Image (tube, rainbow, N blue to C red):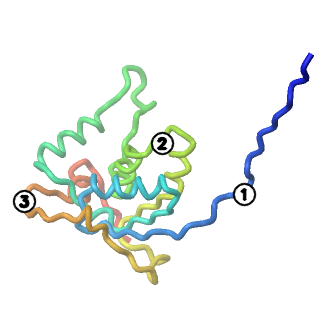
Amino acid sequence: MTAKKETTKTRSTSKAPARETKYVDANNMIVGRLASLVAGELLRGESVVVINTEKAVFTGNPVVLQKLWQTRLDLRPRGNPETGPRFSRVPDRIVREVIEGMVPHRTQRGVEAMRRLKTFIGKPAQYEGKTFKGMNEAQNTKTKGTTTVLKLANALGYNEIKE
């Protein structure tokens, strides 16, 4: 009889080196294009901070856009409507959900990628010294047929809290 050779697989316990955080200003950026670029950065292992999410824009007819998002918000299960699904009306979470739709968020890789994403309304004080750059590929050049995320959120029922 021949003896079987035992092979052991070893996994590297060292983590990948920490990469720099990318700082993105979403002012006047098209949401879908911005989301695809940010999703690519996240899947490559980068950490991304997005500010001014309320100033990002959706292209298309604003009335149709509002109806599409409103039908999504009106979804309820047949049983108890309190069990979900629940969708946010807050501008930074709307952008986050769009980015999440472009990441395989049900896999471990996607979950880790989404942990590296931070979205904010405005510019928080903790990022005052940082330089934020826009993504040229996502820059909006249209003058008609656009609506900001804040206008959409307000139409869906978002009430901005002023301090």
Residue 9 percent location from the top left of the image: 77, 40
Q: Label 2: state its secondary structure.
A: loop
Residue 88 percent location from the top left of the image: 37, 47
Q: CA distance from mark 2 to mark 1?
A: 24 Å
Sequence-wise, the earlier of marks 3 and 1 is 1
Q: Quadrant of the C terminus?
A: bottom left
Mark 3 and mark 1 residues within 8 Å of each other at the beta carbon: no
Q: Amino acid at mark 1?
A: Ser
Tell me the mark number nearer the camera, choosing from 2 and 1.
1
Residue 69 percent location from the top left of the image: 24, 42
Q: In the shown orientation, is residue 131 left or right of residue 126?
A: left
Q: Label 1: state its secondary structure.
A: loop
Going 40% across and 34% down the picture, which residue do you hit?
A: 85
> Crowding at label 1, few (<14), some or many (≥20) Cα neighbours within 10 Å?
few
Nearer to me, 147 or 70: 147
Q: Amino acid at mark 3?
A: Lys
Q: Quadrant of the N terminus?
A: top right
Nearer to me, 6 or 49: 6
The residue wearing badge 1 is: 14
